[in-house]
Image (cartoon, grey):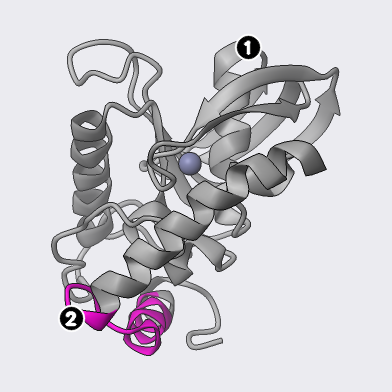
Amino acid sequence: MDIQPPSPPEPASIGRLELVEFPHPALARRAKPLVRIDEALVDAVEQMFDIMYESGGIGLAANQVALPYRLFIINLEAQPDAGEELVFINPSLSRPRGTAVQEEGCLSLPGLRMDVRRPQKVMLDAWNLNGEQIHLDLDGLLSRVVQHEFDHLEGRVFTDRLPEAAAIEARGSLETLHEVFVGKQSRGELPDTETLLARLVQLEAERCAGGIA
Ligand code: ZN
């Protein structure tokens, strides 16, 4: 692991980020580990907090703003002036214990809320924006949100975890989101999927090991 704190020279600016919704290809793509943290990435994380607060969320994964990096942010208070702003880079989860069922929603799946079964406790290892190691034993809401965001980095959304009956219930909402997304592409309001994927590959080449995969 080789993560450096922000330092010049800098790669290209990441630009203005926007929340993406299912079925944007960034959401289905396994995010890649970051090998550098630069000013553009720090700026991107600030934008992610703004987007999360504007949307009323308590967690946001990088691929929800079409950044293919293993990074997510959390603030359980959902407000800039309250709670703690957490940034987790290249996270890993271990020692899942217990079971808990709780209703979840997702900023990338608007209008959908379903009960999701997950381990109650889990250990989290990650790095923060300063390149410092984080080691936490999680329980409660933070455990829930970390596991939800970690799923995003694996290319999964919470509907992938539903039992069959609930998955059938969710299918209609997912089909509607799919139609909306394809409609935006056909009207030129969103780039085509090939263009979206090319942008992800470029971003991976700038900050992930091995360049273009
Ligand atoms: Zn989500």
Question: Could you tell me which residue is drawn at 75 percent across and 17 percent down?
Answer: 100
- The percent position of residue 116, horizontal first and vertical second, equals 68, 29
Quarter of the picture containing the C terminus is bottom right
Circle 2 packing at 10 Å, graded few (<14), some (14-19), many (20+), is: few
Query: Quick check: 158 left or right of 87?
Result: right
Question: Could you tell me which residue is drawn at 34 percent across and 51 percent down?
Answer: 5
Give the residue type at disc 1.
Gly
Question: Could you tell me which residue is drawn at 51 percent across and 53 percent down?
Answer: 174
Q: Earlier in the sequence, mark 1 or mark 2?
A: 1
- The percent position of residue 77, horizontal first and vertical second, equals 33, 13
Nearer-the-camera pick, 108 or 150: 108
Q: Nearer the viewer, mark 1 or mark 2?
A: 2
Query: Residue 129 occupies which quadrant of the picture?
Result: top left
- Which residue, given by chain and number where applicable, does mark 2 sit on? 188
Give the residue type at disc 2.
Gly
Question: Could you tell me which residue is drawn at 67 percent across and 14 percent down?
Answer: 139
Nearer-the-camera pick, 111 or 79: 111
- Which residue, given by chain and number where applicable, does mark 1 sit on? 140
- The percent position of residue 46, horizontal first and vertical second, equals 21, 42
Query: Quick check: 92 left or right of 12?
Result: right
Q: Is residue 192 magenta?
A: yes
Quarter of the picture containing the N terminus is bottom right
Q: Secondary structure at mark 1?
A: helix
Residue segment shown in magenta: 186-203
Nearer-the-camera pick, 59 or 166: 166
Tell me the CA gap for discs 1 and 2.
42 Å
Nearer-the-camera pick, 211 or 158: 158
